[in-house]
Amino acid sequence: MKTPDQLVVAKFAECFATFAVPGVLAIFLLTATVFIGLASRFTEEQDREWWGRTGSWVLIVMVIWSGLSAIVAFGPGLIAWTPKIAASLGGLSGLLTLVLGFGSRTTAQQQEERSHTTVITDFAVRAAAPFFMLCVLIALSLGTSWQLDLFAHHYEMHLNHLTGPMQTGLGIWPDPWGHDQVLHNTPLWMLFLFTVAVTLLGLLMSGLININRFSLHAMYRNRLIRAYLGASRIQTERERSFNPFTGFDNLDNPAVSDVRFDDVRLARRIAREVFSTDTRAQLDAFHALQEPTSAQLQAMIAQLTQELSHSLTNKALAKSAEQLRVGPACRAKIAALQQPETPAGRDAITWLTTLFLNKLHDQSPRPLHLINIALNLVKGDNLAWQQRKAQSFTISALHSGSWNLGYRRSEEYGCNHYLAQPLSLGTALAISGAAASPNMGYHSSSAVTFLLALFNIRLGWWLGNPGRAGADTYRKASPNVSVGPLLSEAFGLTDSCHPYVYLSDGGHFENLGLYEMVLRRCHCILVVDAGCDPQLNFEDLGNAIRKIRIDLGIDIELNLEQIKRAADAKTSDRHHAIGMIRYDKVDANATAGTLIYLKPSLTGNEPSDVQDYAARHPSFPHEPTSDQFFDEAQFESYRRLGEHIAQQVLRPAIQRSEQDFSSLCHALRSYWLTTPPGMRESFLGETDDLKDLERLLRDDPDLLRYDLEIYPELRSVFGIDPGAIEVNPRAALHTCNLQIQLMEQVYLAVNLEEFHNHALNRGWMNLFRRWTSAETFRLFWPTLCGMYSQQFVRFAEQHLNLSIDEVVVLEAMGPTSDLSSLVRDLSIEWDSVPDYAETFMQALHKPLPLEEPTGDHTRRAAWHMRLKARPSPDDSAGPGEILAVVAATRLSVAGHRLALHGWVRPAYRGLGLGHRLFRHAIVELTAAYSGHNLIVDLGPDNPAWAGTSIRNVGWLRFYEQLGFTRDRSDPTRFRMSRQLS
């Protein structure tokens, strides 16, 4: 064995190869740094940004060059010193990364909440993965040296030029310096030939080997086909004929484009447009029979066969099929019908006849199967999608693609032209369930991606890009050359910009399929969330709702409280929740959709065998999805629980014999109601108050007329005549006040602001509508509503159609108006300002004219708002109660200054009366005195009266909302002004 000083090359050439280039780049970087510092006064920010990015890339090149060179040059020698330890650590690190990295205890995103166990496993994976990759690179370097040594011996070169005498097996492995000798002594031409040979061999193999077939996908797909498609196949055309060795039947796995249910659509079109009136009548009569006889059946078949044969002559049937754009399978049968005498034609006629005998032409269209898949974007250029790393992709019988790339016809997309096979249903299902994949959308982890690809643990599928980038590839079943896609898959470089895209489990984007349903504006959506969620955190649902809101702008309102378990409980109240899909927030005049959300959970009323299994398996029904091999008891327990949940949740709608899904959703939404917060606790208290009110209406004779206003049915249905009895105003007023008090109590207790449309609150809302429809109630509403909260008053005005405008009049104040009722209240509030009430009343009696005086009918700048007086038989009612007044007087002619005097009675504030009256006054004054300054003087501050500042601050805010500004020329007075313009 030769040591480095005995090698036939310059000493330590490896160090030169490893560090020479980074050293030169370091000198360049140092020089550039000095230059940037010296020229900093003469360069712009863009120049510094450019130099900063350049320096970053230079550093990246230095690190990669020196790192890879060191691994290639020195790594094999280090392994040769301790081969057993290196092999053990390398294998252990790979196994550790593979098992822990793909397990459920590691997180893909740093933001996820992590337990102590998760922290430890994350650290182990992040430490083991780089070490294993280092071992792989060293092994590749060592293997390359061994191949070159073998290549040299094959051409009978002088053995001493490389490693010495020929050895058996990996001859350079036991020699720590054998790898160095190959590096030093390999001729350049040999290295060139070796590189060309390996490259050509790799390209040849990547062109011959199908990257999609050479993976675990086929095994997984065949298992799905055997377990589901084959086992559930309806034997309508012929008995299942399977291969005795493999157990498969080719008809178990139809093409996706054939799963269209064109038979129903075609039967409906033929019955409507092709059949004669006679045939349609006979067909309806046949289906009306309870048990048709054999003769009746044969007669109906003969009639249908004759009608179909006649239809073929005028091509009406073929035209209907063409207009419907049926799938290839249906088109083949229609083509066979053009020759009814042939065996294929007779079989096609029999097929159509069977459709009508089974009454398919009267059935509703069947749902379109939509298979959800994730298009991986681990290296996507959309910065907003850096966490999700995927986008939604769907395959249906009609189209395949995604909403932002585009769609292709499914009968053309991903076809295997060598075998004339379109994309099959089994393949689409396997892609949709391809959970184990190097690129897993928002679950992708750089620590696992490379190793999963290296060990070929790949269930995903490469297909042509449905967008513009795949215009020449979307018809292909796999890439022509596999090396590029395989490298993209191994290093996490998948995106949507290349001719081929990488597809994997739809759960790598969104695990419920809800996103695509909302995208299509489905108004009734049933979601079954069967993911492993032992803590009932609803991660998959939250992920779907979040992405729908971000991408589509649609909110989903769903209350999950009754599915959640209490801290010390093992059962939930319900298995489901029903929510609203707020399409109306995006689409104008759209109707909100309904979401029915089912969650595997235990409520305590499950069948006894399910409860027994749950008692023996605490994690049921959320056992890990990694358990792919159910035993009999496990399978039956999950099946029976699902059946029980469906029966419990859907029974109210099924019992009503609803025929369409929309009606079913409406029935469920009406039956299953989430109890509003506080409903149960407050129900008895509010009900007791209601009983007292009803008892008062029933027993008090002074309320007979008012009782008939609330319940007019007593007069119209039962003929009760109150005669000449009138409403007792005092009794009615206080009763109305009690009613409003109860209304506010209920409003606060059951949160009517949010739950006024809730079915459990329907009774309260209908009762309140009945009360507020009474004439007496509406008359007293302006008098009483000021004593209640603004939120409640606003709610009553919006939802109960209560309006002050019905009983409040805004009008000009005449010289004969009676203002005596105002003096007392005005004096109480403004007692701290000397002579304020007297000045105010003088302004009301002598306001500014709005036009040239013309006698007693001159319009003056004084207005008031008052309650309408209710007509009485003896005309004893007054003119109505004054609620607010405003008037203007002149302060000075030279300065064009006007004084504004306004006031709202305290009991009527906060109802919008003041704003309405004062704005009307300002508009009238602006028309008559444009350009004048309008002054409001609230008087001086009076520290001796504690309420002065509080009162004046309230009025200052009121006038600010009307466009006035504070005049601070005299800080001791509260004065405001605005210009009339």
Image: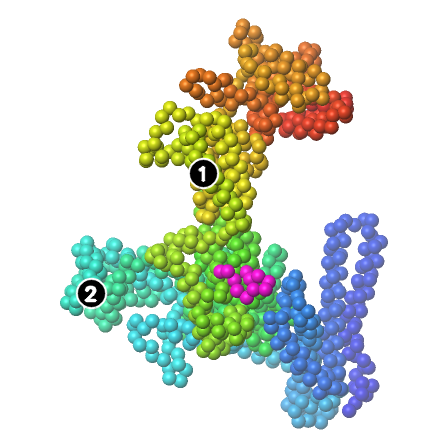
Task: Where is residue 537? Give x, y as percent.
Answer: 57, 62
Name the mark on residue 476. Answer: none
Residue neighbourhood size for the residue with mark 1, other residues' Cα within 10 Å, grouped as few (<14), some (14–19), many (≥20)? few
Q: Which residue is mark 2?
A: 291
Residue 811 on image: x %, y %: 52, 18
Residues under labels 1 and 2: Cα distance? 60 Å
Q: Are marks 1 and 2 in contact (CB under 8 Å)?
A: no
226 lies above or below 160? above
* Amino acid type, callout 1: Glu
218 or 147: nearer the viewer: 218
Give how far across and how far down residue 317 sits, in percent: 25, 59
Which residue ends up furthest to the top in the rendered image? 855
Of pointers 1 and 2, the one earlier in the residue sequence: 2
- Amino acid type at circle 2 is Glu
Left or right, residue 615 beside residue 85: left
Give the quadrant of the N terminus: bottom right
Q: Which residues are magenta?
A: 564-574
| Residue placed most toward the observer, 706 or 404 | 706
Residue to which mark 1 is pinned? 694
The residue depicted at 25 percent of the width and 66 percent of the height is: 354
Asked which secondary structure carries label 1, the reply is helix
Q: Residue at x 40, y 25 (%)?
A: 725
What secondary structure prevails in the magenta region? loop
